[in-house]
């Protein structure tokens, strides 16, 4: 794997751990290429799997937190 990719993945792992301190928990679903590539033909695959991050809001009153949650995940995904 490219060293830059490895550094980015380490950045993401560290960031995901840090989100727990803010009571934000993202589920990670690791999918094989065969399950994804038909729906995402534009992806340039360099690994045999992709990790999908998702969150779940349990109560309607949590809806107001969606913009904040989105901003946090977007910041986490930014390349350092």
Image: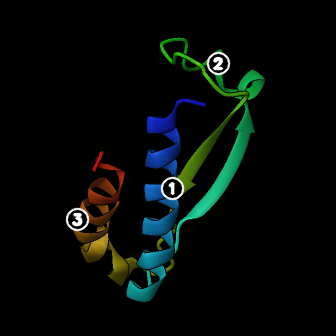
In-image side of 30 versus 42 (left or right): right
Picture residue at 63% right of the left edge, 57% below the top: 28
- Identify which residue, 77 or 31, lies in the foreground: 77
Picture residue at 48% right of the left edge, 82% below the top: 20
Residue 72 pos. (x, y %): 29, 65
- Identify which residue, 56 or 36, lies in the foreground: 36
Q: Name the residue under label 3.
A: 67
Residue 62 pos. (x, y %): 35, 79
Name the secondary structure under disc 1.
Answer: helix
Residue 45 pos. (x, y %): 59, 19
Picture residue at 51% right of the left edge, 18% below the top: 43
Comparing labels 3 and 1, the label whose residue is closer to the camera: 1
Name the secondary structure under disc 3.
Answer: helix
Determine crowd level at label 3: few under 14, some 14-19, many 20+ residues with C-alpha closer than 10 A: few
Comparing labels 2 and 1, the label whose residue is closer to the camera: 1
Q: Earlier in the sequence, mark 3 or mark 1?
A: 1
Q: Mark 1 points at which residue?
A: 10
- Identify which residue, 75 or 54, lies in the foreground: 75
């Amino acid at each position: 794997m490219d060293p830059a990719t490895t550094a980015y993945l380490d950045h993401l792992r560290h960031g995901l751990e840090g989100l727990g301190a803010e009571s934000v928990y993202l589920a990670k679903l690791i999918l094989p290429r065969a399950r994804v590539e038909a729906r995402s033909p534009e992806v340039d695959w360099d690994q045999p799997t992709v990790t999908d991050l998702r969150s779940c809001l349990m109560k309607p009153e949590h809806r107001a937190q969606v913009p904040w949650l989105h901003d946090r995940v977007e910041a986490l995904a930014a390349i350092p």
